Image: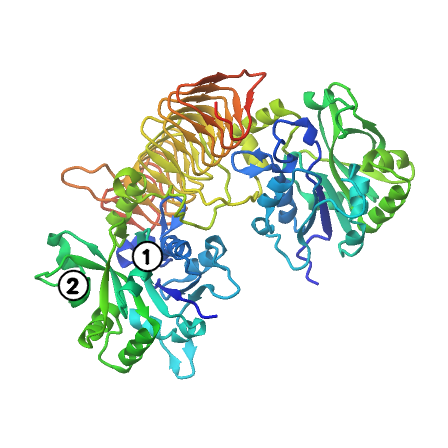
Amino acid sequence: MVNSNSDAMSIIFPNSYDNQVPELVSERLMASIPFASRYRMIDFLLSSMVNCGIDNIVVIVRKNYRSLMRHLGSGREWDLTRKNGGLNIVPPYAEKTVNVYNGRVEALASILEFIKNQREKYVFISDANIAVNFDFNAMIDAHIQSGADVSIAYKEEEIPYGFMNLQPTTSSDLYYTLSLDNGRVKEIQINPKEQGKQNFSMNIYLIERERLIDLITKAYAKGNVYFERDILAPQLNTLKVYGYKYEGYSARISDIKNYFDENMKLLDDENLDALFHAPIYTKVRDDNPTRYIGNARVKNAMVADGCVIEGEVENCILFRGVKIGKGAKVKNCLLMQDTVVESNADVEYIITDKEVTITEGKELKGSDTFPVFVAPRKTV
Amino acid sequence: MAKEMIAMILAGGQGSRLYALTQKLAKPAVPFGGKYRIIDFPLSNCVNSGIDTVGILTQYQPLVLNEYIGNGQPWDLDRLYGGVHVLPPYQQASGSDWYKGTANAIYQNLSFIDRYDPQYVIILSGDQICKQDYSDFLRFHKEKGAEFSVAVMEVPWEEASRFGLMVTDENDKITEFQEKPKNPKSNLASMGIYIFNTDVLKKYLIEDEADPSSQNDFGNNIIPNLLKDGRDMYAYHFNGYWKDVGTIPSLWEANMEIMDPEHSGIDLFDENWKIYSRNSGMTGHKIGSHAIVENSMITDGCRIEGTVKHSILFAGVQVESGARVEDAVIMGNCIIKTGSVVEHCIVAENAVIGENAVVGAMPTDKNHGVATIGPGVYVGDYAKVGPDAMVNHNIKDGEVQW
């Protein structure tokens, strides 16, 4: 066969870290959180995979996945409507008495037969809480060169506040840092609290498919739950686990404040270009171009199509179909799709979810450290 | 299953009066309105009217159009049975022929029509800006019991002699057809949009083909022949926005009208009648900290640091700081460099306007020309392009082109 495609399939967990942003996932999951004016979080990894020739992608959903299914559809926008492979969305099995899966092991065990029937040599496993334009082929090359059994992508960065404050009792999501010796992982720290830069796992794993099947089969029989905690961490002596250092741009969502900040960082062209160096695909909405009317005054903003702007906008991210009325002042805000700010309203440091209306003359202000969040379809 | 009505879009037009814009593409493929091409309008009208089978007849420079249409997915016209098909002239056992005229283009594709066995065929022009519900036109055609209907627009009497005119009785029945007459008897101009009963269309196309003296044109031959035979012909009144963007000034004007839907009557913001197009896939556009943007339409991928007033910017246009763009149509991926002034003009795709260059001029009493810069043209630093210029080659630094 002509080798135009990557010899890897991938499995995405779109619900991971849902609990970090309860506000944003009331009607959706992590992967379908809107990001960067016209995208959803999953668009970044999905597009990166497609750009790298990966065209067999499984999305294992857990809950609140309706918005994601609507977004992904048949996968056509990502060129994933394929006869072989393509996009597969796997909802939890509602058969027998199986509950919704806990942890990756159960989830992977539930699709083990499917994984066995695939042809690719490698499997990527990832979450969807990172917006990144990732080169998966470079990771495969590094994986082969190091002779690793498992490679874990990591980034040298500080553990964000949202993770440090993780309450283990209310959250089932764990995060990991790696202790490395010449690239090989010597230890995996679970929910560490260290300050300063760490080898912070991006939870992008690369493993041979046959090896994955073997590991999952054994772990599932033992009743293990977590791939990292229960499979990788205890076997670091026997399994060759290598770190793959990612040095490009990435935006990891850890709480609502950091969600706001990561969006705002894209107002800097350098960051925007770094994140979009290869195309990122998303669902098309067929909006008309954005219209600036009369005395609209816009400074330092990223604006998607379909907006109508008649007021003042400064330091903002506007998603598709946002309307800003005459005399309205909008400063340091992130307004999701179809938000309406009526005339003479005055808002600052707010995040509106989709279809929010800020009525005429209303004043609503959050602060730099605490942006106010308005839930979907609410009228203020 | 037979289709009730299929559409045939005549898209072979060279658009010779748009010269600089149509060197490498047919007129229906000319970019329009920030993120569209002209053909998006008839195609979206078809889909919004419920027509799911469309033939596009191409001849002149079809490459861009072919690639743009692709499998028709952006218009929801990728169908198992029907959908959109590009129909260029082709070789047949009896020989090969270019399309000799509008009627001949349809004649050569009668087998395409036969495949879907439609009761009606609507013939559309691929180079008009118009939002029209063809299902309402078909309702009219059926109510009148017509064999042929033509969509007409009322035009001012003093301009009537520039058009093909339909003279009708009080029942909208066509009694006479005048092609660009000196003394118009009607001000109902044909829009070049026809509905035929398929059997009538076939009969007249076959007869027309057999006539060696015919120009094989709907306006000049088919319609007069129908009239001569006393066929049931009706004129359907359309009073929405309609523009044949055949010239640079009219193309510029139509773009400007998009920005003023309250007065012009062409509203692209209509949720119930979306115009679909192939997506650029770029990020949201960026307005910089010192930019000034007024009364303009801007789409994905643009980066604005300078001043943009009353202009339409297509995907991926960069306006550097200190540059000024006013009353302009700037097509995809152009770069307007710092210090340049770009006014009252059309700049085609991928052009670069150098630093401190001047393109076009705001209209005066004496001159209201719309300067045109062709695709991929490089206008050098400090170069000057006058308001009547149509530029299709690079201009060196400091050079002046009138």
Left or right position of A340 against B213 = right
User: As shown in the figure, which amino acid type bears the numbered disc 1?
Assistant: Asp
- The chain identifier of the residue carrying mark 2 reads B
Q: Quadrant of residue A178?
A: top right
Pinpoint residue A322: horizontal percent, then vertical percent: 45, 32
Residue B168's label in the rendered image is: 2
Q: Secondary structure at mark 1?
A: helix
Look at the image and name its color scheme.
Answer: rainbow
> Given contact means CB atoms under 8 Å apart, are the residues at marks 1 and 2 in contact?
no
- The lab-note entry on whether marks 1 and 2 share a chain reads yes
Write down the chain letter for disc 1: B
Look at the image and tell me whether residue A380 can be seen.
yes
Kindly give the residue lying farthest to the front in the view shown.
B143
The part of the image, by quadrant, that contains residue A101 is top right
Regarding mark 2 in the picture, which secondary structure is present there? strand
Give the camera-side residue of A275 and A314.
A314
**Residue bearing the label numbered 1:** B136
